[in-house]
Image (tube, rainbow, N blue to C red):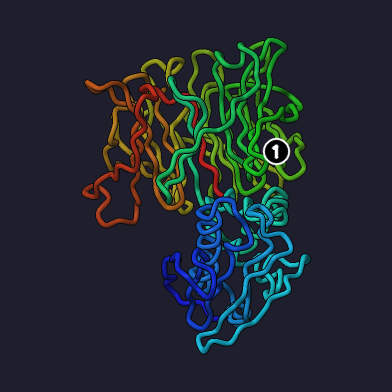
Amino acid sequence: MVFRDSLEEPRIGGVGDCESSVMFDFQNYVITDVSKHFGQDLKFVKEKLQMLVHILSTRRNSLKDGIEDLISKEMLISNLERAGLKNKCPVVITKNGDKHNCQASDDSFLPGLHDDATLDILAWSSRSDYPTLSCLNRKFKSLIAGGYLYKLRRQLGMVEHWVYLACILMPWEAFDPLRQRWMRLPRMQCDECFTSADKESLAVGTQLLVFGRELSGFAIWMYSLIANCWSKCPQMNLPRCLFGSSSLGEVAIVAGGTDKNGCILKSAELYNSELGTWETLPDMNLPRKLCSGFFMDGKFYIIGGMSSPTDPLTCGEEYNLETRTWKRIENMYPSNVGTQSNPAMSSPPLVAVVNNQLYSADQATNVVKKYNKTNNSWTVVKRLPVRANSFNGWGLAFKACGNSLLVIGGHRELQGEIIVLHSWDPTDGNSGEAQWNELAVRERAGAFVYNCAVMGC
């Protein structure tokens, strides 16, 4: 079977003796006689077949050499147990009128196409389609639930970024910038103390980690994208809060913070999301809390924060994952970068890395600054689309989302409070003149962002 580059809309029409069969018109073949095998929801099957065929056709040009030849083979979409088509197979009618009956193999995802080719095709498709694909049959459902496609996506370099938000009037939700779609996460089964206490969040691999306090002490709740549910995450070797953190692929590093007694820490730990384990790393040179972490050029950095209740830090530290050593960088985050009038009341530095370039949202002057690695300095590149100084940087999210910077903040209007997502690609023309793009608006969410994380997988 040869797919067209642009798939025609499936249509309902009479073919042969069937007056209501589903017919997909391809370049050389017509798949028909589907609906006569079931009396359930014809629209459901139509949409699922159309979506799958669309994925297989539009992703053809994105695959590696050799996949195109496999797609060109005759293939039939069958084994739709969810739609009542178990052990049934459609009839394929060629353009010249010849008929071919298909005997679907229970061992393959798509009869006529090797599984490795099917998996590559699905890995290149949008992960927004995975919940729908899992409804096709039990084999697809098992594939999606197993998480293998996400590992394959990493190998192929296929990454999509979703934004995870928790606002004052909104529970955890995910936003897909590509589809412009909001998705509410399941409710976290935590106690009231965790619900009302301050929390920190971090996305790593296909997991969203939320750090906070329960009645029994520090706790970490983990949302699994694959399982679409919350569960308790293993605790750190030294539980903490007010730390700096960041992730790189399937690993994350947390550094500094305070322990249960309020002591400021200089210890650090690495989390492996594949294994679900914490590994203690060498200590930093200085203890610090209310700091921020990020990965840049394959190394982990920590900047900002305080070494005591009254002493802000202007130096940064760089951790080399290969040598397992920390290096101190003087004046990496000087006092004129962030709010220093009352450092104990200020948020941790609002920083984001896009294409290995570090940016900061200045809480005092409402501008975006760019870090120069060569001379260890900062320059103003753009004004923020929202005010960051209203709450000393709190309630505002400044994140990297693919190749763009993302600013998420609240607005109060006559109709109520809303959350607005602004994005800007630093490579778009003149940095100072390029406008922020209003990516999305979330109504009835309040005007304060409590937690935000961006998951790329």
Res 315 seen here: no
What x and y, as percent, mark residue 102?
Answer: 69, 76
What x and y, as percent, mark residue 35?
Answer: 57, 62
Above/below status of 57 relative to 291: below
Instruction: Tell me: 328 left or right of 334.
Output: right
Instruction: Tell me: 446 left or right of 131.
Output: left
Please state which of residues 408 and 388 is positioned toward the viewer in this rendering: 408
For label 1, the SS is strand
Q: Which quadrant would residue 384 be assigned to in this image?
A: top left
Please state which of residues 201 and 392 is positioned toward the viewer in this rendering: 201
Residue pointed to by mark 1: 270
Residue type pointed to by label 1: Leu
Above/below status of 188 relative to 425: above
The residue depicted at 56 percent of the width and 40 percent of the height is 301
The residue depicted at 35 percent of the width and 44 percent of the height is 423
What x and y, as percent, mark residue 355?
Answer: 46, 54
Please state which of residues 132 and 433 is positioned toward the viewer in this rendering: 132
The residue depicted at 65 percent of the width and 62 percent of the height is 155
Please state which of residues 221 and 351 is positioned toward the viewer in this rendering: 221
What x and y, as percent, mark residue 81?
Answer: 69, 55
